[in-house]
Amino acid sequence: MAESLSLARTLGNTNTAGNALNNLGIVAFHEGDYAGARGWYEQRLALARELGSGYGIASALHNLGLVAARLGEDAQARALAEESLAISRELGDRSTVAATLVSLAGVAARQGEVDEAQTLFNESLVLAHETNDRYRIAHILEELTTLAAAQAEPERAARLGGAAQALREAIHAPQPHNERAPYEQALAAVRARVNAAAWEAAWAEGLAMTLPEVFAFLGVKA
């Protein structure tokens, strides 16, 4: 990808350069190199602004918000996500809207704004369902599992965790490794609040749930 970026710059192909910058940022992010990811995304944002690409600007802002969240900079993460959301809504870019709503929900959850987080997660779920983005649905279910764990709701966490696992297995998309450790820590903490049999039973129920049943369990109309 670095070679692709260099060639695109040499040829003056700004669209290819923008895509390469974004991809380099994604790789760095998933490797846990958040400072590196920020650098690539900032270059992507600058190029998108230069080109006047609303989609590129919204995407780069969203990705920079993800980096800020991983670095514990929640105020910055929220500001970036809100800016991305406003642009994405104006463009009618439902995919980026859904992604940014998840980011805002995560910030709300970390700030103890549980009702706001739930509302934002639910709105994102509806959009992900409408765009048939099952990968995003699985991610949102994991976020909701973590939220339930933080609220000391073991059976709810187990059902949602089981549903998320079933969906990931169905689409052959394992959880990214940089998300796995904190997720498993949250599960371990809440699992300790209930006996093993109850946890396993609730997890099995989640594994067996269809998506319509998951949505009904969450009270989401889609």
Image (cartoon, helix red, strand yellow):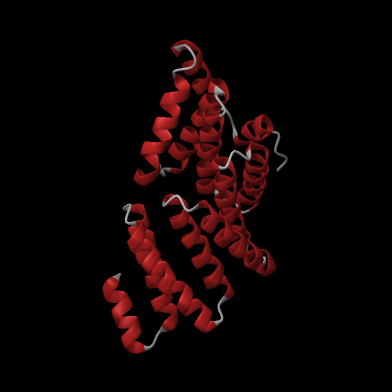
User: Can residue 108 be seen in this snapshot?
Assistant: yes
For the question of whether residue 163 can be seen, the reply is no
Residue 221, position as x, y percentages in the image: 73, 40
Residue in view at x 40 percent, y 37 percent: 182
Location of the C terminus (image quadrant): top right
Residue 1 screen position, x and y as percent: 30, 69
Q: Is residue 25 left or right of residue 79?
A: left
> In front: 190, or 130?
190
Task: Please state the total of marks drawn on the protein image.
Answer: 0
Q: Residue furthest bottom?
A: 11
Q: Which residue occupies the extreme right position in the image? A: 221
**Which residue sits at x=35%, y=82%?**
8
Side (left or right) of 31 relative to 108:
left
Left or right: 31, with 57 as reference point: left
Residue 138: x and y in percent read 51, 41
Residue drawn at the location 40% of the way across and 32% of the way down = 184
Tell which of 7 and 28 is nearer to you: 28
Residue furthest left in the image? 3
- Classify 217 as above or below 104: above
Q: Is residue 87 above or below residue 136?
A: below
Give how far across and how far down residue 9 sits, in percent. Answer: 34, 84
